[in-house]
Amino acid sequence: MKIGITGSNNTGKTTLAYEIAVSLKRMHRKADVAHESVRSCPIGTKGNATVGAQVWILGSQIMAEEELSHYADFIISDKTVIDTYCYGLWAYKNNPNEADASKLKILKELALKYAR
């Protein structure tokens, strides 16, 4: 089962994710936290976010959750695929161009498929 926590930066999502994981482990459940990929993104994210960066972040998030799914019954994420898509929309709105339009379409398709 995936548990996604959504919200603005610095609102306690990561803290809550760890608290949920600890609570589940106390109930003898296999749980782990998938860390927010944005912190390791090599493409601009602070103040100059791009649609390409959001595609990278979503791909990294999916890979991290897939790795955890091999041993954890509960995967808690401190960002969701919906957050990533919304940041992609924001980046596109601030700098619309043809190349990013196709990336945004891919981002939307991946987010919708993986959110289920």
Image: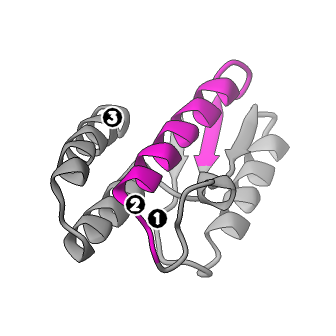
Q: Is residue 79 left or right of residue 114?
A: right
Q: Is residue 92 magenta?
A: no
Q: CA distance from mark 1 to mark 3?
A: 15 Å
Residue at mark 2 to residue at mark 1: CA–CA distance: 7 Å
Majority secondary structure of magenta residues? helix
Q: Could you tell me residue 68's position as x and y percent?
A: 69, 29
Q: Secondary structure at mark 3?
A: loop
Residue lying furthest front in this view? 98
Answer with mark 2 or mark 1, whichever residue precedes in sequence. 1
Q: Looking at the image, which is closer to me, 7 or 88?
A: 88
Q: Disc 2 marks which amino acid?
A: Asp
Q: How far from the left and from the top, in percent, is residue 27?
A: 78, 41
Residue at the disc numbered 2: 83
Look at the numbered discs 2 and 1 and tell me whether their residues touch, using CB distance below 8 Å: yes
Span highlighted in magenta in the image: 48-76
Q: Check disc 1 and report its element: helix, strand or loop.
A: loop
Contact, mark 1 vs mark 3 (Cβ under 8 Å): no
The C terminus lies in which quarter of the figure? Answer: top left
Q: Please, what secondary structure does the residue beneath circle 2 have?
A: helix
Farthest residue in the top direction?
70
Q: Nearer the viewer, residue 81 or 50?
A: 50
Residue at numbered disc 3: 116
Residue 6 numbered tag: 1
Q: Nearer the viewer, residue 12 or 10?
A: 10
Label drawn at residue 24 = none
Disc 2/disc 3 C-alpha distance (Å): 14 Å
Q: Measured along the vertical axis of the image, is residue 68 above or below residue 78?
A: above
User: In the rendered structure, does residue 68 fall within the stretch colored magenta?
Assistant: yes
Q: Residue at x 29, y 32 (%)?
A: 113
The image shows a total of numbered marks equal to 3
State the image quarter where residue 103 is shown: top left
Residue at horizontal 62%, vertical 51%? 37
